[in-house]
Image: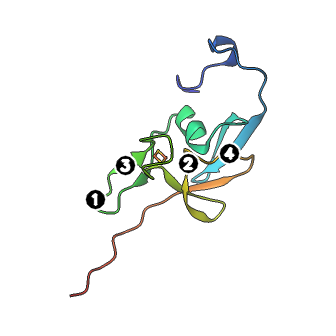
């Protein structure tokens, strides 16, 4: 568990009891709490980047966190280009990172 996911007893917000949710990210099981987004669960488990840019392969993860920038896109259960910051995680979701090469330009 990373510093980003406090044990409920240490959280100053004092959340109520939550149900655990397990998703698989690039084949690895990660656990969060019901109601968290996919990005929230991935970050809480210590992973800061899950996508690479098409132009130069730089790492990307959460940037705006509000669904505007599309830096956080992943494939969820086979659906491409899902914004991880906007999709609430469901138990058993299969999430994979995306990296697409730029198309070749024919002149
Ligand atoms: S982090 Fe910007 S759309 Fe998800």
- The residue carrying mark 3 is 59
Q: Nearer the viewer, residue 45 or 104?
A: 104
Q: Report which quarter residue 8 is drawn in.
A: top right
User: Among all residues in the image, which is located at the extreme left?
Assistant: 107
- The residue carrying mark 4 is 89
Asked if the residue at label 4 sits under 8 Å from ligand 1, the reply is: no
Q: Report which quarter residue 31 is drawn in.
A: top right
Mark positioned earlier in the residue sequence (1 or 2): 1
Mark positioned earlier in the residue sequence (4 or 1): 1
- The residue carrying mark 1 is 56
Give the x, y percent position of residue 106. Answer: 25, 86
Q: CA distance from mark 4 to mark 3?
A: 22 Å
Mark positioned earlier in the residue sequence (3 or 2): 3
Nearest-to-viewer mark from 3 and 2: 2
**Residue at 43% over, 62% down:** 99
Check the image and report above or below for 29 versus 19: below
Colour pattern: rainbow
Give the x, y percent position of residue 32. Answer: 67, 35
Asked if the residue at label 2 sits under 8 Å from ligand 1, the reply is: yes
**Residue at 68% over, 45% down:** 89
Q: CA distance from mark 4 to mark 1?
A: 29 Å
* Label 3: which secondary element: strand
Asked if the residue at label 1 sits under 8 Å from ligand 1, the reply is: no
Residue 84 is marked as 2
Mark 1 is surrounded, within 10 Å at the Cα level, by few (under 14), some (14 to 19) or many (20 or more) other residues, namely few
* Label 1: which secondary element: loop
């Amino acid at each position: 568990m990373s510093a980003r996911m406090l044990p409920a007893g240490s959280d100053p917000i004092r959340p109520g009891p939550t149900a655990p949710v397990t998703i698989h990210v690039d084949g690895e099981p990660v656990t969060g709490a019901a109601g968290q987004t996919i990005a929230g669960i991935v970050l809480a488990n210590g992973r800061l980047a899950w996508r690479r840019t098409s132009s130069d392969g730089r790492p990307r993860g959460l940037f705006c966190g509000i669904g505007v920038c599309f830096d956080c896109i992943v494939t969820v259960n086979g659906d491409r280009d899902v914004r991880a910051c906007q999709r609430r995680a469901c138990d058993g979701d299969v999430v994979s990172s995306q990296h697409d090469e730029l198309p070749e330009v024919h002149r």
